[in-house]
Amino acid sequence: WPSVLVDDEEVVSIIRREDRRQKYGLELIASENFASAAVRAALGSSLTNKYSEGLPGARYYGGNKYIDDMERLCQERALGLFGLDGEDWGVNVQPYSGSPANFAVYTGLLSPGDRIMGLDLPSGGHLTHGFYTEKKKVSATSVYFSSLPYSVDEKTGLIDYDEMETLARRFLPKILIAGGSAYPREWDYARMKEIAEKVGAKLMVDMAHISGLVAGGVVDSPFAYADVVTSTTHKSLRGPRSGIIFAKKELMGDINNAVFPGLQGGPHNNNIAALAVALKEAQGGEFKEYAKQVIKNSKALANALMERGMTICTGGTDNHLLLWDLRPLGITGGKAERVMEYCGITVNKNTLVGDKSAVRVGGVRIGVCALTSRGMKEVEMGKVADFMVKAVKMGVEIEGHMGEGGKKVVKVSEFARALGENEGIDN
Ligand code: PLP
């Protein structure tokens, strides 16, 4: 532990508990990963002290010689990792995270009220792709821009590209967005580019979840089709919490201006340094092996759950995540999430298409990036499936759905109270 922290017992004690939770639990949140010690060291470096509004070579503060070197290095590594030459593509590595990166693209390329079209949240899209409900414009994207989502087919769970085309022809969005937070299958970027061209839209791909898999060459790359590609850097890419925007050169000026001075102030230079470290790590052979193993593990986990009689949306996965449909078991995603948490297994509840309520959601989302970083392979996935099924069945039982004679035994909430919030973490 850094010596300065040793004097702050309260902070150290909380960090230690979280550290133990991560070590002794099974981390299966699809958007999480374990960054390397090198990435975390760069995050804690002196670069956190520096202000550097502007871009390399054009700053609003003095003293940025080395900060310029770092940001240029990070940009070069980002373009290099995805095989982009600097003639066609530019990159901005300053977004504070994925949501600001997406909002910067809209701010740079659209006027208020302009139309966008992305995957609906209950279908696996992200809030920043324009989510709203009948009652509320939930995401700022839907407050400042006009959004009409496309969705997945309720029977297959797959994106209905014909429906997307019909909607796009009627709605005429200026940006069509591919990518999501809970879509377990490949994207048809070629078809989406075709649709975008027909309606005069730009194609933006938010590859936040899969950027590490794109870098590892184990899922399709969007760069041959997209005009803009955004990403977080802390999911499958295994970097610090940050955001990144790639765009065709001619769009880059507007996007840069939207990032700063449009939306942000000084870049978080320690994050940029840590991202540079992660981008180099992702170029190595070990990372490529990791990316391959992520896919193997994800498929192995999906198969193991199905072999144990569980329902996996779309019948499997092409990437790092899967959606477990709990509706046949009669337990909500929320309760399954909680009961698994009491057993040291961390997943998150997830809406499934067809859910009647956003509160009583039907599924959980599971991702294998973090466990793969810990070195787990297919054989461990079988054991993980055993643990999860056991936990969820216990949840079903204590909810009374499968209790003796259909009797209610005890509510999950009572079970939780009896166990205490920290059970399974501290012991
Ligand atoms: N885009 C997608 C597809 C995401 O899944 C997420 C986060 O989970 C984001 C954007 C937003 O990223 P952040 O939470 O870093 O703002």
Image (cartoon, rainbow, N blue to C red):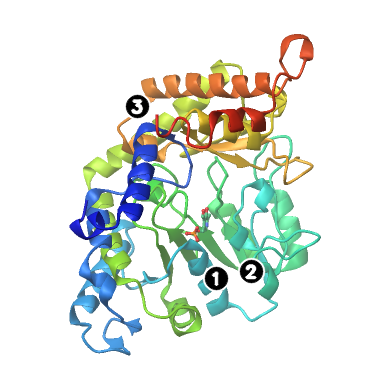
Q: Which of marks 1 and 2 is nearer the N terminus?
A: 1
Mark 1 neighbour density, 10 Å: few (under 14) some (14–19) many (20 or more): many
Q: Can residue 71 be seen in this view?
A: no
Tell me whether the residue at label 1 lies in contact with that at label 2, contact meaning CB atoms closer than 8 angstroms: yes
**Residue that badge 2 annotates:** 141
Q: In the drawing, does residue 220 fall left or right of residue 329?
A: left
Residue type at the position of mark 2:
Thr
- Report x, y in % for residue 419: 54, 29
Of the pair 237 and 222, the residue shown nearer to us? 237
| Secondary structure of residue under mark 2 | helix
Position of 178 compared to 212: left or right? Answer: right
Q: In this view, does 100 lie above or below 52?
A: above
Q: As displayed, is residue 384 above or below residue 317?
A: above
Residue carrying label 3: 377
Q: Quadrant of residue 66 in the image?
A: bottom left
Residue at x 23%, y 54% (from the top left corner): 6
Q: What crowding class fits label 3: few (fewer than 14 Cα within 10 Å), some (14-19), or many (20 or more)?
A: some
**Mark 3 C-beta closer than 8 Å to ligand 1:** no
In the rendered image, residue 73, in percent from the top left (x then y), is placed at 23, 69
* Left or right of 263, for residue 153: right
Label 1, label 3: how many angstroms apart (C-alpha)?
37 Å
| Residue 1 seen in the current view | yes
The residues tagged by marks 3 and 2 sit, at their Cα atoms, a distance apart of 39 Å
Q: Where is residue 318 in the image (x, y as percent from the top left)?
A: 50, 37
Residue marked by disc 1: 103
Q: Which residue is drawn at 59% across and 53% down?
A: 191
Q: Is mark 3 on a helix, strand or loop?
A: loop
In the displayed structure, 107 sits above or below 209; it is below
- The furthest residue to the top: 405
- Total label count? 3
